[in-house]
Amino acid sequence: MGNSHQPVLPLESSENHDLEKVMPGDKYGAAIRILTSYRLTVTAPRIAVLNIFLASIVRHLNAEQLCALMLNGGYGIGITTFRRAIYDLASMGPVSRVLVPDQSSRTLTFYELADQPIHRHLYCTQCGAIAEVHDSGYEEALLRRLRPQGLKPANVDAALVGKCSDCQSEALSAGD
Ligand SMILES: [Zn+2]
Ligand SMILES: [Zn+2]
């Protein structure tokens, strides 16, 4: 497809019936299916967020990266509206958050599609790589431990931070 022009999405619409009319074919079908499976209103900004995740080879993206991809994709949606759609999807279920405690007191926030079982994240403070740890036994044990407390975990993971193995071996070969 290359640089072919993406159709400009219509602005906010609460009628998914209308949206499908405006966007023929199944180009946005996967995004629309995700929204309807969560019983969420189908809007152009939400479709854009999900579509960008579905098309991205990088799984975890921060808001700035999502905005850049949206602008490059020619979706024709205002940044503020688009950002609100990211936050909405993160609080409503289809998108999960990964929080990374930075060196300073800042917290970096990454987003990903909530299409995988609960998993953990390791963040390399040197190169910014994010590795995923899938361990269903661990997650089940954790939930069992949390259940008596009555806490139902939200779809947010606080990443463990450190140096990835690549960055460690680089430091070694550099004679550090
Ligand atoms: Zn690294
Ligand atoms: Zn992840």
Image: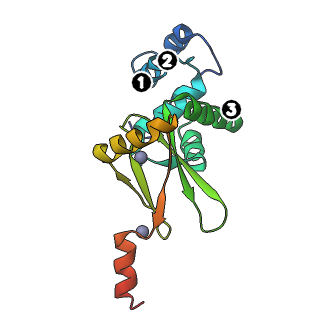
Instruction: Report crowding for label 1: few under 14, some 14 to 19, many 20 or more residues within 10 A (C-alpha).
Output: few
Vertical position of residue 88 compared to residue 25: above or below: below
Instruction: Choose between 102 and 36: the one closer to the eye.
Output: 102
- Measured from the top left, where is residue 108 in percent x and y? 59, 55
Q: Are circles 3 and 1 on residues that touch, CB within 8 Å?
A: no
The answer to whether residue 115 is visible is yes
Q: In the displayed structure, does residue 13 sit left or right of residue 150?
A: right
Which label lies toward us, 3 or 1? 3
- Measured from the top left, where is residue 90 in percent x and y? 56, 35
What amino acid is at disc 1? Lys
Which label lies toward us, 2 or 3? 3
Vertical position of residue 139 compared to residue 50: above or below: below
Q: Quadrant of the N terminus?
A: top left
- Helix, strand or loop under label 2: loop
Instruction: Choose between 121 and 77: the one closer to the eye.
Output: 121
Q: Which residue is mark 3?
A: 81
In the rendered structure, find residue 23 and report the number of the disc placed on it.
Answer: 2
Q: Quadrant of the C terminus?
A: bottom left
Q: Which residue is mark 1?
A: 27
Instruction: Report crowding for label 3: few under 14, some 14 to 19, many 20 or more residues within 10 A (C-alpha).
Output: some
- Residue ID at (45%, 15%): 24
